[in-house]
């Protein structure tokens, strides 16, 4: 039955939408920041960056992979696992289905291998359009599997984080995924393969408090919101408004938790340079 | 005074036990775990260990008092202790930030766990926090990084680590010191992804549904045992002295087992324990 469901889903995903930018129907979109009306094709061609004010729209998985991987080089891992409902939460399955319909993804992360200007690497990309990019069992397992693949294939690994944190609907099992992924990263560390963590808007909670903060090199997109506790929780706890620029990439850089802020349009080249400078070579 | 109230607390518990089906009473356990008169880590340390010397500071920024670390001995065996500590009165609670750690707690824990490894001492951690502190300074000093690094370093430690969940174990703030070879949990302690209030607020946008959340979240010792996260539950059917004595013999028993493993095997056993946590279905390729 599950197989049937997956098949159905896969068939659906073959029918590609002509517009891949994760924005509502129609040909035009209004920038959240400067309110400029932008032609969607222009926005997509500019990697989801507003041409008027340089505001970064959140990038979906597919566009992200397209912007990083050499054309046609991304090969998704064949990891056939499906989300279950360990807490038997009412509505969890329905919610999952609606995110699947909306995004054509089966879970909040895509993992595989790809080439970046010819250099082979493992690549994991999270997508906030799917359940706020939250990490439950399947996301935890996929990232762990990818780390183990990087070890066995002797490849570097790049993880683009984009997540609200651990997924509430799977309770304690979600929390434990932080420990699981971290355990795998200790093995990667020992194996001597490079891990580049890229923080994008938003990276919070259990993702910040596990693999996102454990890269050998940590990059961030400009102006991304990055933190452990959510702003609202902090404001409620301390009873005051938070300062301007709190929990942004620039804040993280200033406080020493990010190696470098990289513009989206230079991300691929920067990743390539970092791989090269760490001794990785183009595969034959 | 505190002991007396604890007795009534225990009585209430044993009454619940009779008609208990463990799952239906999650909120009651939340109340017990949070009871300000519930015994704290230092209470257990005083009774269980023959000697204890507290060691302070992360050597980077400050000494965060919401985590108590130090050296202890029990029947001739030395240990390193990492303990999340709630205050036992208002004054203490202010000092200890109500048991909510700042990043310095985790960095102090890392420092002393590495030292335990250096001198080949087993580690016992006590988990009791409603979560890592959500504050401006905590974020500025990398709360997320501190938690992640604590788990990362703990995973690599080559001496036995025994984790004891004594009260509230909530979110990443608790998980940061839970990466042990064995996890022991007191019967009325809870362990959860977030507080039931926070959970209800995120999932249902209504924090007043906390009781309902507690029931669905699976946060009791029994739940965690069923998920194979917790290895042993300590019954709380008698007084504090009895609980402490059971905990003491359990720590000794677990250590005896873990001592049979080589340093490499200890790391591997811990890896396997956490590697296997996850609930999903595997489907065959079509």
Image: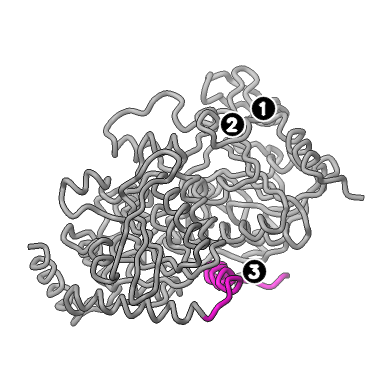
Q: Are marks 3 and 2 on the same chain?
A: yes
Q: Sequence-wise, which precedes: disc 2 or disc 1? A: 1
Report which residue position mark 1 lands on.
Answer: A43
Residue under label 2: A57
Q: CA distance from mark 3 to mark 2?
A: 35 Å
| Sequence order check, earlier mark of 3 and 2 | 3
Q: Position of residue B79 (x, y in %)?
A: 40, 67
Please identify, in this view, whether the residue under mark 2 or under mark 1 is nearer the observer: 2
Q: Is residue B188 magenta?
A: no
Left or right, B201 with respect to B43, comes to right
- Badge nearest the viewer, 1 or 3: 1
Mark 1: which secondary structure?
helix
The residue nearer to you, when weighing A107 against B68, is: B68
Give the structural element (helix, strand or loop) at label 2.
Answer: loop
Looking at the rendered structure, whether the residues under marks 2 and 1 are on a common chain is answered as: yes
Which residue: 34% across, 52% down?
A: B67
Q: Residue furthest right?
A: A284
Image location of residue B104, percent across then percent down: 41, 44
Q: Where A215 falls versus A248 (above or below)?
A: below
Measure how far apart labels 1 and 3 are at the Cα level.
37 Å
In depth, the one of B57 and A17 nearer the eye is B57
Would you say residue B242 is visible in this rendering? yes
Residue drawn at (13%, 67%), measured in percent from left and top?
Answer: B6
Residue drawn where x is 58% and y is 24% of the image:
A55
Q: Nearer the viewer, mark 3 or mark 2?
A: 2
Res B38 quadrant in image: bottom left
Q: Which residues are magenta?
A: B260-285
């Amino acid at each position: 039955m599950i197989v049937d469901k997956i098949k159905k889903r896969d068939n659906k995903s073959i029918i590609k939408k002509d517009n891949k930018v994760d924005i509502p129907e129609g040909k035009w979109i209004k920038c959240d920041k400067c309110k400029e009306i932008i032609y969607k094709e222009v926005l997509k061609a500019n990697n989801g960056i507003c041409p008027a004010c340089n505001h970064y729209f959140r990038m979906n998985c597919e566009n992200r992979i397209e912007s990083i991987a050499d054309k046609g080089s991304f090969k998704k891992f064949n990891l056939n696992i499906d989300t279950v409902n360990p807490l038997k939460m009412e509505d969890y399955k329905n919610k999952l289905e609606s995110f699947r319909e909306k995004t054509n993804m089966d879970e909040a992360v895509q993992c595989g291998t790809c080439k970046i200007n010819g250099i082979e690497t493992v690549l994991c990309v999270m997508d906030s359009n799917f359940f706020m990019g939250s990490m439950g069992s399947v996301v935890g397992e996929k990232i762990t599997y990818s780390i183990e693949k990087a070890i066995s294939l002797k490849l570097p690994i790049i993880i683009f984080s984009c997540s609200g944190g651990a997924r509430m609907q799977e309770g304690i099992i979600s929390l434990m995924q932080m420990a699981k992924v971290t355990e795998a990263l200790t093995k990667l560390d020992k194996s001597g393969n490079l891990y580049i963590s890229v923080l994008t808007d938003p990276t919070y909670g259990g993702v910040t408090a596990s693999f996102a903060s454990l890269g050998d090199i940590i990059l961030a997109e400009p102006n991304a919101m990055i933190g452990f506790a959510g702003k609202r929780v902090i404001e409620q706890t301390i009873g005051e408004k938070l300062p301007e620029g709190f929990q942004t990439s620039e804040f993280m850089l200033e406080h020493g938790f990010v190696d470098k802020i990289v513009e989206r349009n230079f991300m691929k080249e920067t990743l390539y340079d970092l791989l090269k400078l760490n001794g990785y070579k183009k595969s034959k | 005074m505190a002991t007396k109230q604890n007795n009534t607390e225990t009585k209430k518990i044993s009454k619940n036990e009779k008609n208990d089906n463990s799952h239906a009473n999650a909120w009651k356990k939340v109340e017990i775990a949070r009871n300000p008169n519930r015994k704290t880590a230092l209470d257990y340390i005083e009774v269980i260990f023959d000697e204890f010397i507290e060691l302070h500071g992360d050597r980077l920024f400050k000494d965060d008092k919401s985590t108590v670390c130090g050296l202890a001995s029990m029947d001739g065996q030395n240990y390193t202790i990492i303990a999340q500590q709630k205050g036992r009165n208002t004054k203490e609670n202010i000092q200890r930030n109500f048991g909510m750690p700042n990043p310095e707690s985790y960095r102090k824990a890392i420092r002393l766990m590495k030292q335990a490894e250096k001198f080949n001492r087993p580690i016992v951690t006590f988990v009791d926090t409603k979560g890592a502190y959500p504050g401006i300074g905590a974020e500025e000093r990398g709360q997320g990084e501190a938690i992640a690094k604590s788990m990362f370093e703990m995973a690599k430690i080559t001496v036995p680590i025994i984790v004891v969940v004594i009260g509230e174990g909530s979110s990443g703030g608790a998980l940061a010191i839970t990466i042990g070879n064995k996890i022991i949990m007191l019967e009325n302690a809870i362990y959860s992804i977030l507080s039931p209030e926070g959970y209800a607020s995120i999932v249902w946008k209504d924090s007043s549904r906390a009781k309902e959340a507690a029931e669905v979240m699976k946060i009791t010792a029994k739940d965690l045992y069923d998920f194979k996260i917790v290895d042993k539950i300590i019954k709380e059917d008698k007084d504090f002295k009895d609980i402490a004595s059971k905990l003491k013999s359990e720590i000794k028993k677990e250590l005896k087992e873990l001592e049979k493993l080589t340093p490499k095997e200890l790391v591997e056993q811990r890896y396997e324990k956490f590697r296997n946590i996850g609930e999903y279905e595997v489907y065959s390729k079509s």
